[in-house]
Image: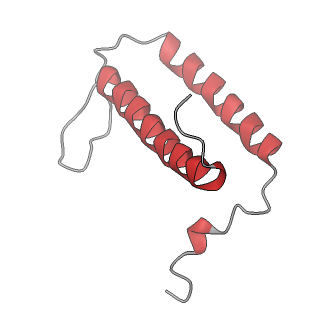
Amino acid sequence: DEDPDREMRIAVGFPLTQLLDEYAEQSARYRELVAGNDLGKQAEGTIRNGLHVDLRWILLHLIEETARHNGHLDILREMLDGTTGG
């Protein structure tokens, strides 16, 4: 409550190489977890509305969220350097 924009500043000193390394590690871990499962396998837990989703839904949700955040980063980059597209 004292700093409502804290999440926008906490990573300022975080080294980009470390961030990319950790992302690569997590991506490899998820690939291993998914590799041995059928896309129709139901999750043990439920989502907010109480539904049991399948692995296909989870992966599509991950793709959607990653794309959304990449879009946010692209907007910030455009604001910084003025370059669009590409």
In this rendering, would 25 be left or right of 60? right
Task: Specify the quadrant that holds the C terminus.
Answer: top right
Q: Position of residue 32 (x, y in %)?
A: 59, 17
In this rendering, would 78 be left or right of 47? right
- The image quadrant of residue 23 is top right
Q: Seen from this angle, which residue lies furthest bottom?
A: 2
Residue at 70 percent across and 61 percent down: it is: 11
| Colour theme | secondary structure
In front: 53, or 75? 75
Picture layout, residue 63 above or below residue 80:
above
In front: 42, or 68? 68
Q: Position of residue 66 (x, y in %)?
A: 48, 36
- The image quadrant of residue 5 is bottom right
Residue at 53 percent across and 21 percent down: it is: 33
Picture layout, residue 68 above or below residue 60:
below
- The image quadrant of residue 59 is top left
Residue at 78 percent across and 56 percent down: it is: 14
Picture layout, residue 61 above or below residue 11:
above
Give the mark count.
0
Q: Position of residue 20 (x, y in %)?
A: 73, 37
Q: Position of residue 70 (x, y in %)?
A: 52, 40
Picture layout, residue 73 above or below residue 64:
below
In this rendering, would 85 be left or right of 77? left
